[in-house]
Amino acid sequence: MSDQAQKPFSFKLLKTDGAARRGEITTPHGVVRTPAFMPVGTQATVKAMYPQQVRDLGADVILGNTYHLMLRPTAERVAKLGGLHHFMNWPHAILTDSGGFQVMSLAQLRKMSEEGVSFRSHHDGSKHMMSPERSIEIQGLLGSDIQMQLDQCIALPAERSEIEEAMNLSLRWADRSRTQFEKMGGPGKGQALYGIVQGGDNPELRVESAQRLGEMPFEGYSVGGLAVGEPQEVMLRMLEVTTPVMPVHKPRYLMGVGTPEDILESVARGIDQFDCVMPTRAGRHGLAYTRFGKVNLKNARHAEDPRPLDEEADCPATRDYSRAYLHHLVRVNEGLAAMLLTWNNLAYYQFLMQGIRDAIEAGTFEDFRQKTKEDWARGDLAPYVWS
């Protein structure tokens, strides 16, 4: 068996434009074009979307959640049923997170130790232990292409001593995660394991974490512990000190980010992958993302507006339904509102990512970034007024 057959995961850096990077990640389930936005399929589904719709919008990879899937239907059951790709009818790349963030934010009666985190399910109170080894075991059973080490993510602001303690624990867990990943044969299956840079809002700790993590043999590296309530300028400052010391020829993933502006600014600082619940969650709450910025369909000014969200868009949800109709669906709490607005939002995010990739390829990313921000600042056309 060839080395390529044994290790199909790879990353190729195709073009740079300043710090912005365009590349390709090869996985056992297809190529991921970067910079990439990964729609979040928390419980083996991108909420309010069919899998083929998500694919048709341009998504090469989606994210599944280890914490939720280990509780329901359980990783063992998913494995028995053929793995997560088959289970959810998504034959393309899947990244699973470690479950650590959800354990910290959702689970009840958490107890942290060197071994891991013991907790009770927020569903039924059942007891569980999430260790680095168990997290990797679950992700292996799910069969995801890209897996994440278990780390400790703390809320900001925090004292330096607390940040440093969490960073060092995450580094020890990174080593244990890698050992378990190799024990389960992940590299031989063509799968990848990413390490996670921690360090809170402290530049020195961010650099130290990135350097020490870079000495470990991960297929990719993530920046964690940001977008947890800190101002955007803090997040961007941490990226500015972190990405220059991350391995150049490995993919870089900023976890849990974010808004379209966050994505633009993070690409400008060398990030390749993103995920966030924002476009799907916003869609379920009446908020649309467009080339002109955000449109709140709950607003009464849309009640008699016959225009679509964007008549030039390729997405049917964006182009073929009036704002008046979307406003009506939101107001009466119809399920179709969530379906159409989620469709629109994910379409816009993928439209943005394709625009970013094209601009990097053309060497015009800075112009694209400024024009996109100007369009958002200019906003939508004036509200429709009946004559």
Image: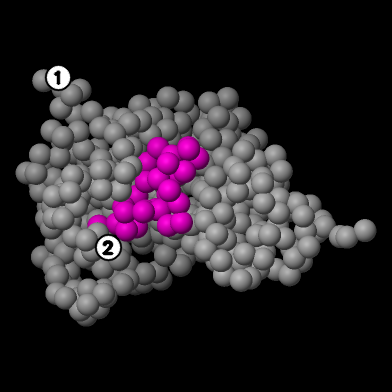
Query: Vertically, is 157 above or below 26?
Result: below
User: Which image quadrant for residue 112?
Assistant: bottom left
Q: Report the magenta residues as a range.
A: 39-68
Can you identify the residue that label 1 sits on? 2
Q: Residues within 10 Å of mark 2 (few under 14, many from 20)?
A: many
Q: Is residue 41 magenta?
A: yes
The residue at the point 63 percent across, 48 percent down is 318
Most foreground residue, 340 or 211 = 340
Query: Where's residue 286, x and y in %?
Result: 59, 64
Residue 26 is labelled as none
Query: Where's residue 162, x and y in %?
Result: 28, 70
Most foreground residue, 160 or 386 = 386
Most foreground residue, 5 or 23 = 5
Q: Secondary structure at mark 2?
A: helix
Q: Residues within 10 Å of mark 1 (few under 14, many from 20)?
A: few
Q: Amino acid at mark 1?
A: Ser
Q: Quadrant of the N terminus?
A: top left
Can you identify the residue that label 2 sits on? 68
Q: Is residue 326 magenta?
A: no
Work out whether mark 1 precedes mark 2 in sequence or the reverse, and give the earlier one. 1
Query: Where's residue 160, x and y in %?
Result: 32, 68
Query: Vertically, is 185 above or below 128?
Result: above
Decide if residue 219 is in sight here: yes
Question: Outermost residue toward the left?
Answer: 183
Query: Where's residue 190, x and y in %?
Result: 19, 33
Left of 325 or right of it: where is 384?
right
The residue at the point 16 percent across, 76 percent down is 126
The residue at the point 80 percent across, 59 percent down is 383
Q: Secondary structure at mark 1?
A: loop
User: Which image quadrant for residue 369?
Assistant: top right
Distance from the alpha carbon under mark 1 to that under mark 2:
36 Å
